[in-house]
Amino acid sequence: MICPDVAGRGESEWLPSPLSYHFGQFLADFRSLLVHVGAQQVDWVGTSMGGLLGLMLASQPSSPIRTLVMNDVGAFVPLDALTAIARNLEAPPRFDKLSQVEAYLRHTHRDWGEIDDAQWKRIVRSGARRFEGGWRLHYDPRIARPAQPMPFSSGLYFWGAWYQVRCPVLLIRGEHSEVFPADVAETMLDAKPEAELVEIPGAGHAPSLMAPSQIAIVRRFLERTTTPRVGRAKMPAHEARLGKGEAR
């Protein structure tokens, strides 16, 4: 399993210019990473921007992506949602105590849905960095640039990439998500009815994929689509809402 820190996040270095944070750079980084580890095929699970990067890689000729899971992001991201994402990334430059970091992350991640206290502690430990005088979040605050649409645009469009995807796709949507509206999910299924859609009750942007029930959904999709079988069974009805009429 490969869990990379995208440039400007986690243990990755901060790039010298905010103009360097863009999808083209990230895609080049991922292709280099896959060559480095010798992975010819991968099953991609991506949340938000990670899902969009997976979508763009999966749409390319000779794509290394065998199966694609897009968590709470689709082929169109509305302007209002992008503005909210960018606002959440504009964190205070420092926190005096780790408890302040936790309070801040609990607020900005309040739409993630089911997360227990132990998981919150793990999110805080991995999401904060100690420095002289306190704590700061574990990313370059300038990474908000990719979330900014072109002037006079209503959002970010990825429909061209979606039409080119040939691998099995699982779309995960938070019930209250504004980043992945229900009508976008419905239109994606109209274009590719073989794709599958799961809606996570009580979550917004983005489902944490930390709850056992959510992990099970992803695991079963990957097991079903990567293991040769005679006939592919759909997910149990209580776990997935599939198709145009049931996407909300």
Image: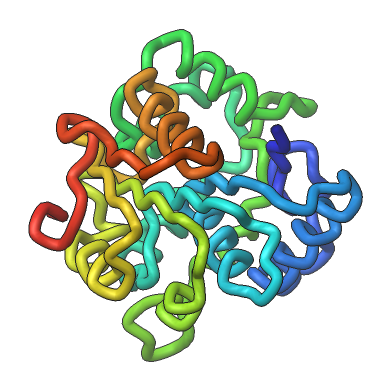
In this rendering, does residue 58 appear at all? yes
Name the residue furthest front. Answer: 230
Query: Is 230 in front, or is 178?
Result: 230
Residue 78: horizontal and vertical position, in percent?
31, 70
Relative to 101, residue 2 above or below: below
Q: Is residue 239 left or right of residue 15?
A: left
Residue 55: horizontal and vertical position, in percent?
53, 64
Relative to 221, residue 216 above or below: above
- Residue at image position (47%, 39%) is 229
Name the residue furthest left. Answer: 245
Residue 52: horizontal and vertical position, in percent?
51, 62
Q: Is residue 9 left or right of residue 102?
A: right
Residue 1 figure quarter: top right
Name the residue furthest right. Answer: 36
Colour option used: rainbow
Residue 207 figure quarter: top left
Name the residue furthest top. Answer: 118
- Residue at image position (70%, 59%) is 64
Q: Is residue 64 left or right of residue 118?
A: right
Residue 58: horizontal and vertical position, in percent?
58, 65
- Residue at image position (18%, 67%) is 183
Relative to 79, residue 173 above or below: above
Count all numbered tags in the image, as a single digit: 0
Relative to 62, residue 198 above or below: above
Quadrant of the drawing holding the C terminus: bottom left
- Residue at image position (20%, 50%) is 242
In this rendering, does residue 83 appear at all? no
